[in-house]
Amino acid sequence: MARKNRINRKKTNGAVILLLAVGSALMFVPVLWIILSSFKSLAEIYRSPPTFLPERWIFTNYTEAVAQFRFLRYLWNSILVTLSATLITLIINSMAAFALSKYQFPGRSIIFILMLATLMIPIRVIMLPVYLMVARLGMANTLLGIIIPPAATPTGVFILRQYMLTISDEMIDAAKIDGAGHFSIYWKIMLPLCTPALAVVTVFSVMWRWNDFLWPLIVINREKLFTLQLALARFRGELVTDWNYVLAMTVLSIIPIVAVFAGMQKYLIQGIASTGLKG
Amino acid sequence: MRSLKTLKTLKTAKKKKPLSLAPYLFLLPNTIIFTLFIIIPALSNFLMSLYRTSPFRDREFVGLDNFRYILLIDDLFPRSLGNLARFVVWDVLLIVVLSIAIGVLLNQAVRGKSFFRSAFFFPVLLSPVVVALVWQWILHNQFGILNGILQKVGLETRPWLLRPDLARTWVVVVHVWATIGFFALIILAGLQSIPASLYEASRVDGSRAYQDFIFITFPMLAPSIATVTILGMIRAFEIFDHIYILTGGGPGTATMMVVQYIYRAAFELDQFGRAAAASLVLFVIILLLTIVQYLFGKRREAL
Amino acid sequence: MKNIGLLMVACLLLLTPALLLGQSAADAPAKAEDVIRFVWFTDGPDQPAIEALVDRYEDENAQVAVDFAIVPFGELNQLLITQASAGQAPDIARVTEPYRFFEFGLDLRPYTEPGFEKQFLDGPVKLVTGPEGEIFGFPQDLTMNGPFINVSLFKKAGVPLPEGDVPWETWFDLAKTVKDRTGVPYAVAADRSGHRLDGIIQSYGGSYFTPDGKSLNLNSPETRGALQTFVDLHEKGIMPLDIWAGGSGYVGGNQQFINGQLVMYISGNWQVAQFASTIGDSFEWKAAPNGVNVQSGGMPGGKFLMAFESAGNPEATGDFVQFLSSKESLAAYASQAMFLPARKDLLEEGIEYPVRSDVMNSFLADLSRLPATAYSDNYHLSFGPVGNVVRDRITQAITGELSFSRAMELMIREAGEVMR
């Protein structure tokens, strides 16, 4: 990586660090404030002017919030939904992207344009008919109903297709000569070459699934199948919102995903460099 | 390591293959789900736009009445379209420029690189509800941290979310803040797939850093930039949660976007037909934009 | 051909998770014979109160399990309409505007004792009575709008509190004086809600609908005048822009009041529990009567429990409804959550509240002298949508986006459209 870098003069280095530091501060301080505020009492959260550090650290926001529902059950449901949905998304999206980028066939443009256009239909707008379909297929009130409908996300197809377009056909041709079939070309050659794009789609899918609450809220009507985001949403009432619990739950709900991201970061970004086009 | 010659083929190579079943099979799983859960619901939604609905009566066929209402009579639909157009332009512009800048910075081999990457990515982890809530507190006229700081250092405080021009600006800033990490990641992935050999070759020719950027980085990054632009547009077009909680479309209707118009019609005023008509108009606009973009992209590919 | 392998992978992909997860979802515990699905949204103190009742019911009825789920209020309407459209509605839900779901409602008459609905106040019962006399639920609590006063600020400013009934203008002027003398940022705030706004309009003799409910009354001189006054209050800085220009849907001023930065806060009795716990001893506060211009104002309101046509057993639902609506249950519920009851017998006997019963009684006193139009407005079937239209359009006048007369014109047109 370092070898690749063309800027190694110290001055520029300093400027880069300074810019990055200022940028990260802008990005991170609001988040830090959430974390700190989650240890404040409701009265202190409502204080004006606001405090930065808690006057008195209290942990009851956490204990009381968690005591109100079965935290581990919700957490497990969230993990199950996020992981399986992401896996399905990755596989079917990359298959579709492979077809759309490496084959010429009648209907290709139409399928692609249609996908791109529907890509921008906000889920809120078609929620009702989508749910009617889910119910008709018997998937209402199952985790499957949360997982499957958004899996064919055009966004994922789009990201992967864009990336696959940049991959040379040489290797495919070489493999063909060796007698490889369509599927093994996709599986053994295309997928490894696409690691960076797959990583981006993974991040996108995990984030999206983990944070989504409206779709699970509609589909699931049994409390034992609730996900973590539904637990967070419950504290928003008509007239009164328990912000202290909302904040505590927010922090709890981002911890797993921060952990995943921290763990994956090496593979996500640095790993990309070693694969990429050098495959 | 790859030579420059092979790289050229990357952009252009696309061979004709004999017609086979394979691409259709690859598309099959995605297309089944896509058809069941996006195409069919969208179509049935469009059918709804021809009806007038009410919780107390059976729905009644009214032809194009809903379209006439939203396009010719209602003042809020055109206004929300205008707001959306303005929002999309600024939002996408900022996202493209900033994601390139941040991506390039994050690609430098400096100390603490991993920390910086995480910091920029952090806001992406937050749900829209939380993002909007936090910024509402920061920007609150009376309780907000921003005005608190301004007051302390003796500067003039402002009602950030209560004046139309300021609120419009902040809505863009907050959305960019919340999503830029994701887009910078796409750029970063793109940057890292540029072979080092290209830069080494140009180094031999004695080129400068900015020349590298213009002649190597930028063209090689084009597909990533296209991805960012299109995804940015999608996110911008469907904006709802961030704004709904941050300004609620206000002050007045200064930041009311089309999805909020649809939501208000359907779930606050019980006018499902009108909401469906509005979503069909939005869809047609998006479709036209997509086709233009696609044709434009095709031409560039062919070049 | 490799294509066959591909096809098989495609099918497997779709099926594996289907089998895996479909099973895990299907094996829900079937210990109890009847599962009652109960959807709730919470404003805080009501939650322990209802949970205690649910637990007691489950203890007393071993064959019934109540699947109690709390959902965010903001998405409640969308949730119920969507699920009910697909025949997946919950058995019972707590709602604010039951009539929006009438087409999905379960008529409780066959499953409850005769005269069930007669136990409650007639006004609220109208809102759960279907076009053919069906009874879809019952009013679980009653709310009353009115102002809260920061008494400490009045004392600090040396301004005596007015005695007896005074018009809103007197309150506004006094609050302004208190604000100026004490240096707090806010004089008067009213929740951003078409319901709260109507409560002020009532004092001026105005209303949203004509008393017969057949047409809009927005253009009457009384209503128009009150709305004009409301817009002017923002222009004069007596009411802050923060609330009405500060968001969509409902925006509250409770944060400002709790902080002691607001002299007068027009809201309602549901705030009492939170105020009692968060304000504590930091300042003295109380409820004041609504302003009296031509008459006393304010609006009644409340929450309902509504039964839906669902997959569940209507007999079990009916029994559960009987339990929740019993005198004993509602007395415990109202006392713990600090609500006013909607049962006639409880209203007569009164409820013992753990704290601040003085405040609760002050709201009750105003409730007894509400004008008739407050009821006819609140129990009008288009009150929700029309209230939202009024709220949004008057906001446009407050922010200066539209002139007052233009805002009124558009308000009346759009309200007419949603009533059609």
Image (spheres, coloured by chain):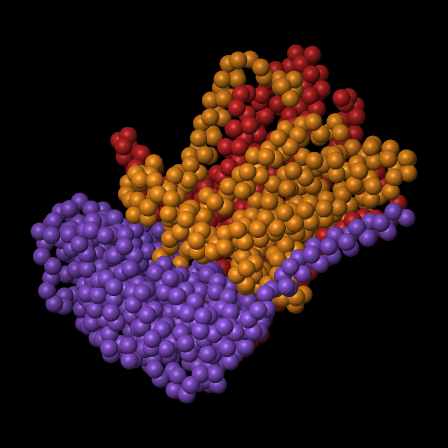
Chain colours: A orange, B red, C purple
Quadrant containing the N terminus of chain B is top right
Answer above or below: position of C333 versus A72.
below
The residue drawn where x is 43% and y is 62% is C41
Q: Is residue B251 visible?
A: no
Image x and y of residue B137, in percent: 36, 44
Whether residue A132 is visible:
yes
Residue shown at 16%/65% (left/top)? Answer: C167
Q: Is residue A104 left or right of residue C131?
A: right
User: Which quadrant of the figure has residue B58?
Assistant: bottom right
Q: Where residue C274 appears, x then y in whole percent? A: 30, 57
Position of residue C331 relative to residue C46, above or below, is: below
Front residue (pair C313, C382): C313
Instruction: Please tell me how many numbered marks the rendered image carries.
Output: 0
Q: Position of residue B280 (x, y in %)?
A: 59, 59
Q: Is residue C130 above or below residue B220?
A: below
Decide if residue C162 is on the left or right side of residue C133. left
Image side of residue C233 versus residue B279, left or right: left
- Which of C100 and C57 lies nearest the eye of the viewer? C57
Q: Position of residue B65 (x, y in %)?
A: 54, 69
Quarter occupied by the C terminus of chain B? top right
At 15% from the left and 52% from the top, the residue drawn is C152
Decide which of C355, B86 is in the foreground and name it.
C355
Residue shown at 51%/14% (left/top)? A11
Residue found at the far bottom of this picture: C114
Quadrant of the rendered image containing residue A104: top right
